[in-house]
Amino acid sequence: MKEDYKKEQEVNFNELSMEEFILYYNQNIPISFPEATKEALKEFQETHASLFDKSKAWTIDKHRRRVIDWLPSYNKVV
């Protein structure tokens, strides 16, 4: 049980590429939520530039909740 928690924490704080973030995000959201796409996350990155450092890395802990909140409004525009 502790090992599962430790692995989950590692995933939450590891820096991910956009592609890795999309894969993890889409596999771990409820079916009713809109899926992330590369196009959408590029727009998110531009709109929320202050959330990213020079590496442009994504983390589940830092970005997942914000993407969940933002993505429905992006999908209404597209």
Image (cartoon, helix red, strand yellow):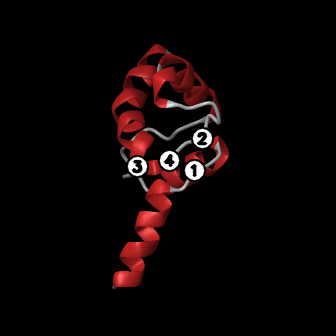
Q: Residues within 10 Å of mark 4 (few under 14, many from 20)?
A: some
Q: Mark 2 points at which residue?
A: 57
Residue farthest toward the top in the current orientation of the protein: 77
* Structural distance between the alpha carbons of marks 3 and 1: 10 Å
The residue positioned 63% from the left and 41% from the top of the image is 18
Q: Mark 3 points at which residue?
A: 61
Tag 3's secondary structure? helix
The reply to whether discs 4 and 1 touch (Cβ–Cβ < 8 Å) is yes
Separation of disc 3 and disc 2 at Cα? 12 Å
4 or 1: tag closer to the N-terminus: 1
Q: Are marks 3 and 2 in contact (CB under 8 Å)?
A: no
Label count reads 4
- Disc 4 residue type (three-letter): Thr
Label 1 crowd (10 A; few <14 / some 14-19 / many >=20): some
Task: Identify the image quadrant of the N terminus.
Answer: bottom left
Q: Looking at the image, do the residues carrying marks 3 and 1 touch, with CB atoms under 8 Å apart?
A: no
Q: Do the residues labelled 4 and 2 touch (CB within 8 Å)?
A: yes
Label 3 with label 4: CB-CB less than 8 Å: yes
First in sequence: mark 3 vs mark 1:
1
Say if mark 1 contacts mark 2, CB within 8 Å: yes
Q: What label sits on residue 15 in the rendered view? A: 1
- Badge 4 is on which residue? 59
Residue beneath the point at 65% across and 45% down: 17
Q: How far apart are marks 4 and 1 (CA)?
A: 5 Å
Q: Nearer the viewer, residue 76 or 41?
A: 41
The amino acid type, in three-letter code, at marker 1 is Glu
